[in-house]
Image (spheres, rainbow, N blue to C red):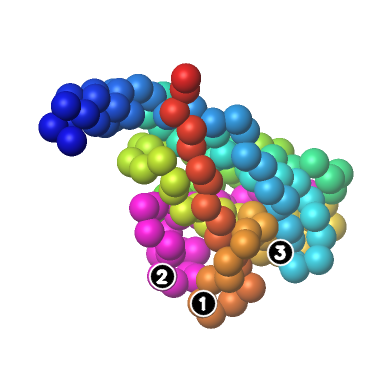
Amino acid sequence: MRKYLPFVFLAVAVMVLLPYTASAAETSLVAGRHFEIGTVGVVADGAELVVTYTITEPGWCIGLTHLYVGDTAPVKGAPGQFPYHGDAGCAQSFEFRVPLTTGAPFVAAHAEVDRTDGKGETAWGTGTDRLRGGWGTYFRVIISVPE
């Protein structure tokens, strides 16, 4: 076993020192539980995780945004308590760049979106797990180390 120990240390050092990369992970951005209006894209860029909200349906725009990225699953479904906030005004796209601290972060993406008729909706990036206290969801992104 001792003869393999240097290789184990080398493998761990390579994993820590190499930047994380990922092919773009993408999920639907759903407004009012029923309207698929865009996407939430997630990709690693060096030591940062880039999360991009994009509107693909005409007649919608992004207002306030709330983002959770963490090593553990989000505990509460209140987007106002998420660590990252932004105001896109009324844009078709909005991007967050957050420190990448794990190879498998949990992500919950929320936005307040507006329609051209003036009605607002809440929107969530579609996830595999439901948050407590609402219809919001979160998902996990697996980041791969380059070969």
| Residue linked to disc 2 | 75
Give whichever of discs 1 and 2 has the lower sequence position.
2
**Gap in angstroms between the C-alphas marked 3 and 1:** 19 Å
At label 2, counting other C-alpha atoms closer than 10 Å, the crowd grade (few under 14, some 14-19, many 20 or more) is few
Question: Looking at the picture, how far across and down is residue 106, in whole percent?
Answer: 47, 53
**109 or 21, which lies in front?**
21
The crowding category of the residue bearing disc 1, from other C-alpha atoms within 10 Å (few below 14, some 14 to 19, many at least 20), is: few
Whether residues under marks 3 and 1 lie with C-beta atoms below 8 angstroms apart, the answer is no
What amino acid type should be assigned to the residue bearing mark 3? Glu
The total number of labels drawn is: 3
For mark 2, give the secondary structure: loop
Visible residue check, residue 113:
no
Residue shown at 41%/41% (left/top)?
Answer: 103
Position of residue 59 measured from the top left corner of the image (x, y, whole percent): 84, 48
Instruction: Name the residue at 81% across, 66% down.
Output: 34
Task: Identify the residue at the far top of this view.
Answer: 147
Which three-letter amino acid code belongs to the residue tagged 2? Val
User: In terms of secondary structure, where does tag 3 sit?
Assistant: strand
The magenta segment is 60-82
- In the displayed structure, does residue 84 sit left or right of residue 17? right
**Front-most of 80 and 35?**
35
Q: Which residue is mark 1?
A: 132
State which tag comes first along the sequence, 3 or 2: 2
Q: Which residue is mark 3?
A: 121
Left/right of residue 26 with respect to residue 15 in the rendered view? right
